[in-house]
Amino acid sequence: MAKRISQKIYQYTAIFEPDVRSGGFTVTIPSLPGCISEGDTFEEAADNIKEAAGLYLEVIKEQKADIPEEERGVVVAPIQIRV
């Protein structure tokens, strides 16, 4: 009988910040401290942060540490303040 490998899917909130100097985006995942990536387009940045987060979680798993879970997603939205 073949051994089944199961994988759990984790969901995290990624913060995309436009890089006004060079264009593109810098991306972080607050629940994974130090997990940061970038890309010339939003799509590239999204792909790159997924890869970075996957590698980040693999290291945690290899160290037999608990993988951080985001209890509930956060909503990130711009607000305007009059002063």
Image (spheres, helix red, strand yellow):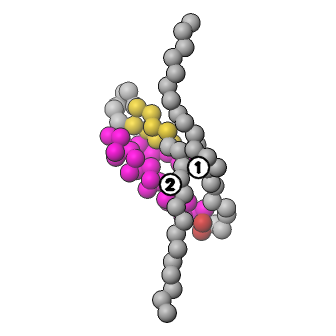
Q: Report x, y in % for residue 70.
A: 61, 50
What residue would you read off at disc 1? 32
Identify the residue shown where x is 33% and y is 32%: 23
Mark 1 surroundings: few (<14), some (14-19) or many (≥20) residues within 10 A: some
Q: Amino acid at mark 2?
A: Ala
Please tell me whether residue 32 is drawn above or below residue 78 in the rendered image: below
What residue would you read off at disc 2? 53
Q: Report x, y in % for residue 5.
A: 51, 77
Residue 36 is covered by the magenta coloring: yes
Q: Tell me, yes or no, whether the two marked residues, 1 and 2, touch with CB atoms within 8 Å.
A: yes
Q: Is residue 25 visible?
A: yes
Quarter of image, res 18 = top left
Identify the residue shown where x is 63% and y is 55%: 68
Q: Earlier in the sequence, mark 1 or mark 2?
A: 1
Mark 2 surroundings: few (<14), some (14-19) or many (≥20) residues within 10 A: many
Residue 43 is covered by the magenta coloring: yes
Q: Amino acid at mark 1?
A: Leu
